[in-house]
Image (spheres, helix red, strand yellow):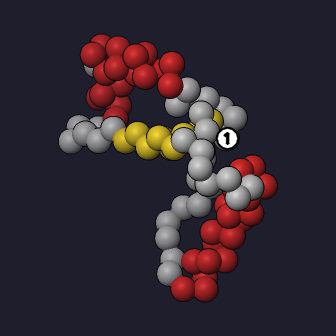
């Protein structure tokens, strides 16, 4: 599970996979243009990266009451927002 917040808003990634070279630049260009439109050149905004890693399947974690409490505790950060 991975979240990236920029300026208090959830930042989404629409790309899948990664290619190097010109093909990769072309793949990522729509994301770059969207970010420029959304944030301009203001790179000084607060950024938060959050990753939850586990050696068990996510479906098993979601059934764990302790994991559910963790997600509820993280909810005030806004990481579950939909304004991507």
Q: Is residue 63 visible?
A: no
- Farthest bottom residue in view: 22
Dot 1: what SS?
loop
2 left or right, relative to 23: left
Q: Is residue 46 left or right of residue 38?
A: left
Crowd around label 1: few <14 · some 14–19 · many ≥20 (10 Å): few
Front residue of this view, candidates 75 and 41: 41
Residue 24: x and y in percent read 57, 77
Which residue is located at x 74 percent, y 55 percent? 40
- Considering depth in this image, is 54 or 46 the residue closer to the camera? 46
Q: Where, by quadrant of the figure, is residue 22 drawn?
A: bottom right
**Viewer-side residue, 33 vs 53:** 33
Q: How many marks?
A: 1
**Quadrant position of the N terminus in the picture:** top left
Tell which residue pokes out farthest to the front in this image.
44
Q: Residue furthest left?
A: 55
Residue 50, can we see it?
A: yes
Horizontally, residue 46 falls left or right of residue 51, namely: right
Q: Quickly name the residue at label 1.
A: 84
For the point 69% across and 70% down, the residue is 29
At x 29%, y 29%, the residue is 60
Quadrant including the C terminus = top right
Q: Position of residue 17 (x, y in %)?
A: 50, 66
Residue at the spot 51% in from the left edge and 19% down from the top edge? 76
The image quadrant of residue 65 is top left
């Amino acid at each position: 599970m991975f979240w990236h917040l920029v300026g208090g808003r959830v930042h989404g990634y629409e790309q899948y996979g990664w290619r190097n070279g010109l093909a990769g630049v072309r793949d990522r260009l729509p994301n770059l243009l969207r970010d420029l439109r959304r944030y301009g050149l203001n790179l000084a905004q607060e950024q938060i990266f959050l990753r939850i890693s586990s050696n068990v399947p996510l479906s098993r974690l979601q059934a764990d009451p302790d994991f559910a409490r963790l997600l509820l505790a993280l909810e005030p950060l806004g990481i579950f927002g939909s304004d991507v």
